[in-house]
Amino acid sequence: MKAEVRRFTDHPPEYTLWQVLRRKQLLVRCPRCNGSAIAGYEKEMLTLRCECCYQTIRYPCSAPDYAVKDFCAACGRWMNLSLPEAPNPHAKTAVVVCPYCGSRQSARIVQTSSRHLNPQTQLRLYFSDSYRGQPVWALNRAHLRYLIAYVEATLRQKGRFTASNGEDYFYRWGQEHQLPKFMKLAKNRAGLLKLLRRMQSGG
């Protein structure tokens, strides 16, 4: 009997520490009750809100730096442009001019500096374990679902996007590029899936 093909289509990186903190979606261990707490940046403060004991904890931190890092929709070249000021907290994109072709377009915003994270905070991720001596972790529940979908897939494909000229392109760098090699190997699929699903169920 022919094995079932499980398809997976990747997308641009959205599960990085700074992006998740900026969206107030990092899931960590509450330092008071060890339950799950949502962490994120709010007005130059790192704020934790526990889902179990309902405590709110705030840590001071300095302002983050932001940049636009994306492929130009017109010429396809990589743009890495620092933003002169912090964007709207809810903004995911900023309008910039490509330094190569001069095309004006919207591109995704990322945080570029780690200096804003207070090193004394010692946040512990809620989803954290190990597989054969290798660390396995997820930044939040959505990230964990992504890892499960990726690992269980038997056919993995790059994501596509349509540029302003109407042409279709593959993303050169996807979320997959953030993953270590051992998570991409078919021989580790069964063991990793068992671990990830145990993490998902809280066991």
Image: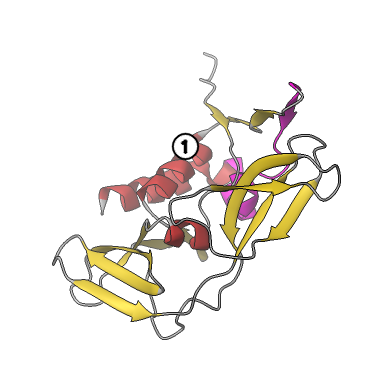
Q: Total of numbered circles in the picture? A: 1
With respect to residue 29, does 16 lie above or below?
above
Query: The residue tagged with tag 1: helix, strand or loop?
Result: helix
Q: Which residue is at the front of the view, 16 or 89?
A: 89
Q: Is residue 138 visible?
A: no
Q: Residue at x 65, y 49 (%)?
A: 177
| Residue 105 lies in quadrant | top right
201 is higher (above) or lower (below) than 170: below
Residue drawn at x 73%, y 41% as measured from the top left: 104
What crowding class fits label 1: few (fewer than 14 Cα within 10 Å), some (14-19), or many (20 or more)? some
Q: Where 21 falls versus 101 (above or below)?
A: below
Q: Which residues are magenta?
A: 166-186
**Residue 34, magenta (yes or no):** no
Q: Between 55 and 178, which is closer to the camera in this rendering?
A: 55
Q: Three-letter amino acid code at disc 1?
A: Ala
Q: Which residue is mark 1?
A: 149
Residue closest to the far top: 1
The residue at 64%/45% (across/down) is 107
- Find residue 154 and report its horizontal and vertical position in percent: 57, 30
Q: Is residue 193 left or right of residue 179?
A: left
- Where residue 40 sits: x, y (%)? 37, 64
Magenta span has 181?
A: yes
